[in-house]
Image (cartoon, rainbow, N blue to C red):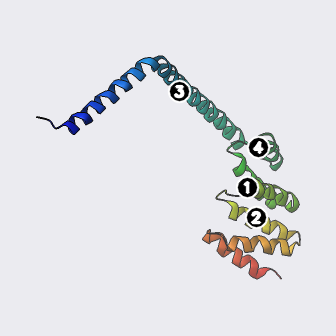
Amino acid sequence: MTDIPSRMKGDRIVESLERGEHWFTQHRVKIAIFTGAFIIAAFVSQYYQNQNKEAQAALWNEASKLTTSQQKIDFVSANPSAEATPFLMLQTSRQLLDEGKFAEAEATISQFIAEHTSHPKVSSALMVRGYAREEQGETEGARADYQKVQGMEDQVNQLLATEALARLP
């Protein structure tokens, strides 16, 4: 024979299950609608993600064909949110340095630093800007950039920054 408290617990469980079944029966249409809406939203989200991937791939393809610094600057201006933009900004600033256009290189890399503060190449960008400033005679600005690099976790650029600081007057 089952003791009364156990039977009461069993009755409560049965009652809870019956209430749940009753609630489900009353709300099954709403549940079906919400489930369907969730599934449709997931499909739409996936569709737009695929569209974005295709668009980004096209922009990467376009960016890879650019050769002059002006073409790259124009691309960056026209496509600020493209995945290729930060890398193109770095490449462009380096190309401008090679062309002896130090002020333009500084402006391009400064824009990169301001817009991509957590990018993994910020230490490299600071080195480029420091060099551009150094070439323009802006010793204190260059020193500030090199000192920032020394405080970062990029060991290669830390070493380069130490060497750069040693050659500054």
Give the residue drawn at x 62%, y 70%.
156
Quadrant in which residue 98 is drawn: bottom right
Q: Are marks 2 and 1 in contact (CB under 8 Å)?
A: yes
Give the residue drawn at x 75%, y 79%.
165
User: What is the three-letter code of the residue carrying label 3?
Assistant: Phe
Measure the alpha-carbon separation of dots 1 and 3.
41 Å
The earlier-in-sequence mark between 3 and 4 is 3
Tag shown at residue 38: 3
Q: Are marks 1 and 3 in contact (CB under 8 Å)?
A: no
User: What is the three-letter code of the residue carrying label 4?
Assistant: Pro
User: What is the three-letter code of the residue carrying label 1?
Assistant: Leu
Q: Position of residue 82 (x, y in %)?
A: 70, 42
Q: Residue 99, can we see it?
A: no
Q: Which label sits in the foreground, 3 or 4?
A: 3
Give the residue drawn at x 71%, y 74%.
161
- Tag 1 residue: 90
The earlier-in-sequence mark between 1 and 4 is 4
Tag shown at residue 106: none
Measure the alpha-carbon separation of dots 2 and 1.
9 Å
- Tag 4 residue: 80
Q: Is residue 6 left or right of residue 59?
A: left
The earlier-in-sequence mark between 2 and 4 is 4
Q: Position of residue 26 (x, y in %)?
A: 44, 18
